[in-house]
Amino acid sequence: MVKAANSRGTTPASPDCVRVLVVGGGYVGMYTALRLQRKLKAQLKRGEAEIVVITPEPYMTYQPFLPEAAAGNISPRHVVVPLRRVLDHCRIIIGEVGSIDHAKRTATFTTLATEEEGTGPVGISYDELVLAPGSISRTLPIPGLAEYAIGFKTVEEAIGLRNHVLEQMDIASSTRDPAIRDAALTFVFVGGGYAGVEALGELEDMARYAARYYHNIKAEDMKWILVEASGRILPEVGEEMGKYTVRELRRRNIDVRLETRLDSCEDRVAVLSDGARFPTRTVVWTAGVKPHPVLAASDLPLNERGRLKCTAQLSVDGAPHAWAAGDAAAVPDVTADEPGKECAPNAQHAVRQAKVLGDNIVATLREQPLQEYRHKYVGSVASLGLHKGVAHVYGRKLKGYCAWFMHRVYHLSRVPTVNRKSRVLAEWTLSGLFKREIVSLGSLEHPRAEFELAAGGERPKESS
């Protein structure tokens, strides 16, 4: 067993204890740790094994539910799974891994207390490493993007966007300036993948419903614009269903602009590559993701896209005792007809890869043969708002209510734990019986604002 890199840091495991370090608490991190927790139950009890999970957040976010959380169909706390409850036999550390030296089998990380301690990053040693840090938003050097755009990868961003949209409707309803009203009711979404299309579809549906409660706002007053650099949207559901989605969105008066890019959003004006200019207070950026920076801060082999080179057994190629899956890993697709093809970095593969990854780590510890990851991609489902959707599953193409229903059934079956399944199902049932909630709780983002104002401070300025 390699000793810890920093004597003041995390206590090293005993020589007889095998430590598995899991970096990241998302799909792959949580499901792999859960698999190991079950498979190594006896060893964990005897102190012969230890599973350490280092993650920035104490929960796993089920990202396919973010659009519904933004629309208010699901409570935000039911979109996340608390890691300490699910991984009750693992050691959970809330922190960020900054670097990995796999040659020495050590990693350094910072925690919420690191800055106050003032003693620098903590070192931790490991026997087996699982790299599952996920991905981050891929941004471009577009003027104004960092200052005004909103992302859509976390539950905080989803709820913040919901509050923001409703707040813009409040601004539009109360202002007497036509320019301010027009900008407040213009919503620009950049990126025609799952995140962008589903977020736009759900939020437009919510805002259309909310408009009936405003005396001076109609659904037709709002402008919803989807900007996509390629010539199609939702490529995962196939070309035919992608074209149907464009027609469906345009039928709802959503301006879909293909082969168009966002050139600037400075001064709250979205400037597109086709020459169009839209004064707007809302730019949502969902134009792709890129590998987490911790991958580049390691001595592990990366491909040209910055992802870890992996084998079909989900081990890092040429790096024994290092494993990866999901967004961080370039895993060969052994079921593909063409050579060299890799598994898509999506949730469908990530959850299944985590199962094989966990089993292979256990097999390695027990000196047993490893298995290859093989799963034929069965298709995709996407929601376009309440009772609207598209799907391409097992070669069958569905749209409208049937696709929307399949979307809900599929993701309900995939969300972790019976507790979460029951809560989500209960919320869906209640939302079908009662009216939508259209309240903005934007003040939650500044919980001390009122107290600071009362104490003589200033009210925080709107940032988006």
Image (cartoon, rainbow, N blue to C red):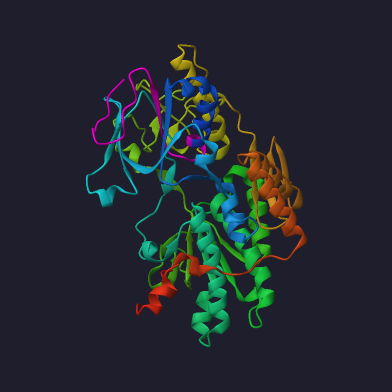
**Which residue is depicted at the point 38% across and 38% down?**
305
Q: Is residue 160 visible?
A: yes
User: Which of the two residues, 407 or 456, is positioned nearer the viewer here?
Assistant: 456
Q: Where 209 sits versus 361, above or below?
A: below
User: Which of the two residues, 413 or 16, is positioned nearer the viewer here?
Assistant: 16
Does 5 appear in magenta?
yes
For the C terminus, the image quarter is bottom left
Q: Is residue 298 visible?
A: no
Q: Where 119 sits versus 268, above or below?
A: above
**Which residue is depicted at the point 58% across and 81% down?**
173
Magenta segment range?
Answer: 1-29
- Most frequent secondary structure within the magenta stretch: loop
Q: Is residue 215 left or right of residue 354?
A: right
**Which residue is depicted at the point 75% across and 63% down?**
434
Q: Where residue 137 sits in the image (x, y, percent)?
A: 42, 50
Q: Where residue 249 sits in the image (x, y, percent)?
A: 64, 60
Q: Where 239 sits versus 369, above or below?
A: below
**Which residue is depicted at the point 55% across and 79% down?**
172
Q: Is residue 114 left or right of residue 171?
A: left
- In which quadrant of the rendered view does residue 222 lie? bottom right
Does 79 appear in magenta?
no
For the N terminus, the image quarter is top left
User: Which of the two residues, 59 or 296, is positioned nearer the viewer here?
Assistant: 59
- Outermost residue, bottom side: 176
- Outermost residue, front side: 46
Q: Is residue 412 left or right of residue 362?
A: right
Q: Where residue 83 sits in the image (x, y, percent)?
A: 50, 41
Number of numbered tags placed on the structure image: 0
- In which quadrant of the rendered view does residue 226 lie? bottom right
Q: Where residue 129 sits in the image (x, y, percent)?
A: 38, 28
